[in-house]
Amino acid sequence: MKQFQIANGIHMLTMNVEDILFEGIWEIANGVTLNSYIVQGDKTAIIDGVIGWDGIPEALYENLKKIGVDTKNIDYLIVNHMEPDHSGWISNFRKIKDDFTVVCTEKAARMVSSFYGEDKIRIVKEGDILDLGNGKVLSFHPVSNVHWPDTMYTYERGTKTLFSCDMFGAFGKMEDHCFDDELTPEETDFFEFEGIRYYSNVMATFTPSLRKAIEKAKSLDINAIAPGHGPVYRKNPQKIIDDYYRFSLYADGAGKNEVTILWGSMYGMTAKAVEFVEGILQREGIKYNMLEMPQKSESEMIATVFKSAGIIIAAPTYEYKLFPPVAAALNELGRKKITGKLAFRFGSYGWSGGAEKELKEIIERNKMNWDFIESVEFEGAPREEDLVKIEAGVLELVEKMKEKVVE
Ligand code: FEO
């Protein structure tokens, strides 16, 4: 765990977490940070808490000491939302100190109470103020369904710092650079992808609510954005606001100027056509990503499809249906409400087809509204005439995806 001063009287504590499944689901290849913020006026508030997945907050207490904060002097726990990656230390804290007040929205209060048995709770609504003294004034701004229903922003008026909870967050570990102005170009790219991974894995289902949260952030005069995960934006907070808006467009079918091949093959027949397609994309100078399922993690799969303007689905028929790992991937994309993508499918079949029927069912059942170029199916190995049709489909996709590109 590390500590940084982000403004006079405001500190950040941040800890890298690895080798976990985030939310018990997401295998995050590059880890994640948990950020906590301490605001000191005459009274002291801690906004969210940093603990390991083991729920033990001793490292948090040690690091509070290092910035001169005695845990006994914490007056307020601001719970921007109740998800236990931020709030899981409350019960433990109650064991060492009894006189503090939890500050949160009404929806969070119910969960803080049911999860941790807390009843000393101050419920806040839009625009409510908590004056900590000595120039530190917090205001509270609910941003429902980002991604939990109880979420709120906390804003410190004197320093114009927005503590944005999960909003504007990113996966990815932070080493020595925790502020946007410190990041190298490589680290900036790293956190852009980890932001996409975070948005697509955790937030995408709630895109309409995120757009409202973007508007609320724009209505505040912001010097710095301090999220619960990932870097603090103090040089150019507008960049992460713009990035998040762009990500919201990816959820509706836009993407970077790249193609993702989401594919699987039982005995190499569909794989032969995939290899052929790679050659076409290389010849045409199109950036492309390969997602062979089930080898790739769900986290990587969702993030990569999400950010691409063109999707190629290459999968055979398996037991009268779509190759199951690819079907599962598409169902997960549907659950995440990733809609409006431009796509083209091809695949092999043996004694019967059926993949195409299930593909249509998945797209319709999940209301994904993907725009498909006519599919190509072939019996056994792809023949010359099949490859000609596949090439035509790929070239049509490459042409049409220009309308989808937002970078
Ligand atoms: Fe970072 Fe929604 O918890």
Image (tube, rainbow, N blue to C red):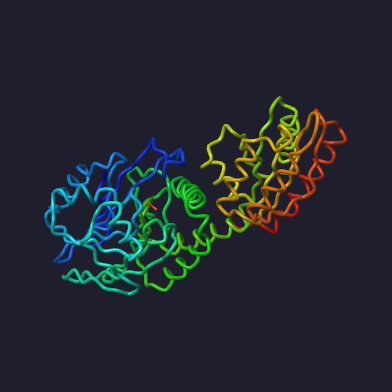
Q: How many marks?
A: 0
Q: Residue at x 36, y 45 (%)?
A: 174
- The residue lying toward the viewer, choosing from 333 and 303, is 333
User: Which corner quadrant of the image does residue 103 belong to?
Assistant: bottom left
View extreme (top): residue: 267
User: Which corner quadrant of the image does residue 24 belong to?
Assistant: top left
Q: Residue at x 55, y 51 (%)?
A: 336
- The residue lying toward the viewer, choosing from 302 and 310, is 302
- The residue lying toward the viewer, choosing from 204 and 190, is 204
Does residue 400 appear to the left or right of 234 in the view shown? right
View extreme (right): residue: 385
* 195 is higher (above) or lower (below) than 101: above
Q: Please state the horizontal and vertical placement of residue 247, each as a whole percent of the image.
A: 54, 57
Q: Please state the horizontal and vertical placement of residue 78, each as a whole percent of the image.
A: 26, 60
Does residue 51 appear to the left or right of 229 in the view shown? left
- The residue lying toward the viewer, choosing from 51 and 358, is 358
Q: Quadrant of the N terminus?
A: top left
Q: Residue at x 71, y 30 (%)?
A: 271
* 176 is higher (above) or lower (below) than 211: above
User: Which corner quadrant of the image does residue 31 belong to?
Assistant: top left
Q: Please state the horizontal and vertical placement of residue 187, each as a whole percent of the image.
A: 43, 46
Does residue 358 appear to the left or right of 155 in the view shown? right
Q: Please state the horizontal and vertical placement of residue 30, each as a whole percent of the image.
A: 43, 39
* 157 is higher (above) or lower (below) than 65: below
Q: Quadrant of the C terminus?
A: bottom right
Q: Residue at x 22, y 44 (%)?
A: 57
